[in-house]
């Protein structure tokens, strides 16, 4: 009887143990498959040089737009054209179905990053050197990137690609599955970004007309230091959030071939980004250098008559 009871217990627990063992093996194999999965990425869109150049340009535009808005026009249009090129390349790559959704999903953060260059010029008087159509164009570019993100979350994510060897991941303060319930949230957020970009672009010329009609004189062009500090802090936090989300999604989706300078095409945006930073530094340091040089010239011009006067006095005393 004891042997039969032990045999009965083993007969009842053996299937459960076998089922648990199979599930553990499947889980370990799935983790190994995910770790070994490398999704190819488009280095012309997501390459290291492209990303660094893009971040540097956004940072330069943010600094100039908040602290020295009169110099913002020197780099503002370059940043707009750069984003246009990035979005065009991403759309072309997606239309050709060259890369899997796990690689393209990072491009859905372009609206968030592109909005950084627009933040300093909302609800304020634009400098004379920065035409209103350029700011409206920047808002239109953000709207186009939002349309690309909408397309991806509604259709692009469902594309089947042989190189997609793992479930696409998305950042929302956590490593989430892009095809889970979080997809519904992004389907709502991306049209909201589109509406915000359209309203932001429409508010720029309207605010200029209202402000110009309400204010008279040169006092309306004086910058407000507390407002500039608040806008700068907001822009830096916004930019940091976009960069973290962009980079984490590339890492979580195991996108390969994008973290090295393997193509010469990455050097162009990287060079533009470095030049934007140099341009920003010159905008701050340049006037001080010019003042120093001009003051030295004035000192030299003043020193020559004084020297001549001193020589004349010595000559007169010697003749006496």
Image (spheres, rainbow, N blue to C red):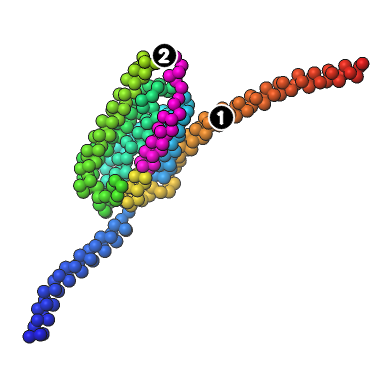
Q: Label 1's element?
A: helix
Residue bearing mark 1: 286
- Residue 198 falls in image quadrant: top left
Q: Residue at x 91, y 19 (%)?
A: 318
Residue 303 appears left or right of 48: right
Question: Which is more N-terminal, label 1 or label 2?
Answer: 2
Q: Residue at x 8, y 83 (%)?
A: 4
Density class for disc 2 (Cα within 10 Å; few <14, some 14-19, many ≥20) is: few
CA distance separating discs 2 and 1: 31 Å
Q: Is residue 284 visible?
A: yes
18 versus 133 height, above or below: below
Q: Residue at x 16, y 68 (%)?
A: 19
Residue interval drawn in magenta: 217-243
Q: Label 2's element?
A: loop
Residue bearing mark 2: 216
Q: Position of residue 103 (x, y in %)?
A: 31, 46
In depth, the one of 18 and 82 nearer the eye is 18
Q: Residue at x 23, y 46 (%)?
A: 182
């Amino acid at each position: 009887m004891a042997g039969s009871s032990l045999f009965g217990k083993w007969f009842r627990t053996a299937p459960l143990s076998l089922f648990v063992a199979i599930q553990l093996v499947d889980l370990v194999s799935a983790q190994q498959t995910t770790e070994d999965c490398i999704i190819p990425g488009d280095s012309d869109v997501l390459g290291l040089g492209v990303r660094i150049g893009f971040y540097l340009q956004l940072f330069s535009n943010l600094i100039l737009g908040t602290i020295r808005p009169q110099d913002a026009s020197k780099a503002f249009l370059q940043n707009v054209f750069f984003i246009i090129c990035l979005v065009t390349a991403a759309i072309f790559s997606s239309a050709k179905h060259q890369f899997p959704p796990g690689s393209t999903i990072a491009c859905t953060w372009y609206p968030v990053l592109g909005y950084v260059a627009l933040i300093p010029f909302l609800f304020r008087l634009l400098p004379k050197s920065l035409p209103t159509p350029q700011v409206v164009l920047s808002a239109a570019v953000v709207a186009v990137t939002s349309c690309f993100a909408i397309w991806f979350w509604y259709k692009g994510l469902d594309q089947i690609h042989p190189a997609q060897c793992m479930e696409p991941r998305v950042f929302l303060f956590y490593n989430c599955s892009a095809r889970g319930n979080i997809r519904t949230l992004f389907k709502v957020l991306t049209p909201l970004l589109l509406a915000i970009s359209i309203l932001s672009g429409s508010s720029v010329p309207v605010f200029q007309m209202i402000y110009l009609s309400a204010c008279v004189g040169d006092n309306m062009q004086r910058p407000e230091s507390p407002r500039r500090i608040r806008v700068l802090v907001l822009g830096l936090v916004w930019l940091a959030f976009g960069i973290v989300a962009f980079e984490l999604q590339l890492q979580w989706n195991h996108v390969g071939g994008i973290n090295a300078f393997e193509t010469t095409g990455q050097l162009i945006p990287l060079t533009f980004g470095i030049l934007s930073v140099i341009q920003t530094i010159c905008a701050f340091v340049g006037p001080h250098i010019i003042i120093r040089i001009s003051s030295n010239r004035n000192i030299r011009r003043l020193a020559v008559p004084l020297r001549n006067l001193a020589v004349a006095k010595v000559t007169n005393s010697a003749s006496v």
